[in-house]
Amino acid sequence: MKQYFLVSILFFFFGTCIAQQGAGFNFTYDNAGNLIQRKVVVYPNVPPVTGRMASAKDTTQKDSLPPLSVYPNPTFGEVNIDGTLPTNITQADVFLTNEQGQLIKKLIYYGGLTQFNISGVQTGIYYLSVNYSKKNKKVFKIIVTQ
């Protein structure tokens, strides 16, 4: 019974991973609940699942928020933030945090092209969060070099 439970759990997780890649399992049971057939099904034309953490891209893109660019990446010294604010919002809070979530620097963003001075920040990976409100924000992964 323990082996059946373990195998079922493994098939569930394995099936979930395969389903994200455009394939899955199809099980057939009889009226008594006995497994009759098990086969792998491949779904055509399903786009592959890709990672959300690209260096120069927004990691929390929301359709309702206007586009925002953060460059150069990797960077040293300054980061340019370029874009517009959502309607009815006059400013946004910008936070630079390290991988542990500690606040390194902050800035008030009023839209348009703004340079964020990050000189003196150690080499590493940081997250630049542009908070429009409590529920709406964009987060960018920033690589700082010397």
Image (cartoon, grey):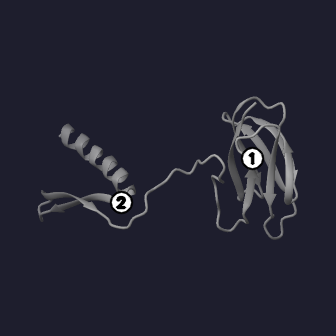
Residue for point 74% across, 56% down = 69
Q: Tag 2: Cα neighbours inside 10 Å, few (<14), some, or many (≥20)? A: some
Secondary structure at numbered mark 2 = loop
Q: Nearer the viewer, residue 62 or 49?
A: 49
Residue for point 34% across, 53% down = 18
Which residue in the protein does label 1 denote? 72
Number of marks in the rendered image: 2
Report the Cα–Cα distance between label 1 and label 2. 35 Å
Q: Position of residue 49 (x, y in %)?
A: 46, 56
Residue for point 17% across, 62% down = 28
Q: Position of residue 23 (x, y in %)?
A: 31, 58
* Residue 20 quadrant: bottom left
State left or right for residue 87 relative to residue 11. right
Residue for point 36% across, 60% down = 22
- Amino acid at the residue labelled 2: Gly
Q: Nearer the viewer, residue 4 or 53?
A: 53
| Residue 22 numbered tag | 2
